[in-house]
Amino acid sequence: MPSIDAASSYADLRRQEAGAPKRLYAIDAACTPASPVTDVAVLADLAGAAVRAGGGHVLANSHVVFPNGAITLVLILAESHLSIHTWPEESVIAIDLFSCGAIDGQRVLDELTGALRLTAVRVAEVERVPGQRPL
């Protein structure tokens, strides 16, 4: 887990993001035989590269590899978080990006879905507004 020291280096960034849009991107997609989604190190590297391409900053990551090879990977970002869940037996993947501020969420997703060679990509985008009640 990131320490307060790691997060504190981004304190100015977080203050700048206070009034910025907050968006949740929910992605459902299909994996292909060429999709590198069964190796957690490769998955983490590609996810980190996608975040950096979108102008984001990875503070830490954590993962679990299940007995069937499924992976849950979470990247903690200065701009919020990215989570990836794989189901190899179904050849599907779910990616959630919650973004705050200057990170280009669409760029992150374009980079990641391309690097993972995903097909049948469906994206739902939800703007989150602090202080507002959910519908």
Image (spheres, rainbow, N blue to C red):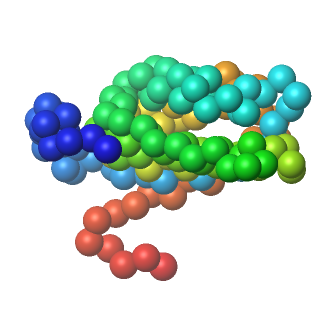
Q: Residue at x 63, y 44 (%)?
A: 65
Which quarter of the figure has residue 132?
bottom left
The residue closer to the viewer here, 127 or 91, is 91
Q: Residue at x 48, y 79 (%)?
A: 135
Q: Position of residue 39 (x, y in %)?
A: 68, 29
Q: Quadrant of the N terminus?
A: top left
The relative height of residue 58 versus residue 97 in the rendered view (above or below) is above
* Whether residue 1 can be seen here: yes
Residue 29 visible in this rendered orientation of the protein = no
In the drawing, does residue 17 fall left or right of residue 50? left
Quarter where residue 71 is shown: top right
Where in the figure is residue 111, as x and y percent of width and height?
59, 24
- Above or below residue 41? Residue 14 is below
Residue 27 spot, x, y in % from top left: 65, 48
Instruction: Return the residue found at the far front.
Output: 67
In depth, the one of 40 and 8 nearer the eye is 40
Total tally of numbered discs in the picture: 0
* Residue at screen point 78% across, 27% down: 35
**Residue drawn at 21 percent across, 50 percent down:** 19
In the depicted structure, whether residue 108 falls above or below residue 96? above
Q: In the picture, residue 34 is in which quadrant? A: top right
**117 or 43: nearer the eye?**
43
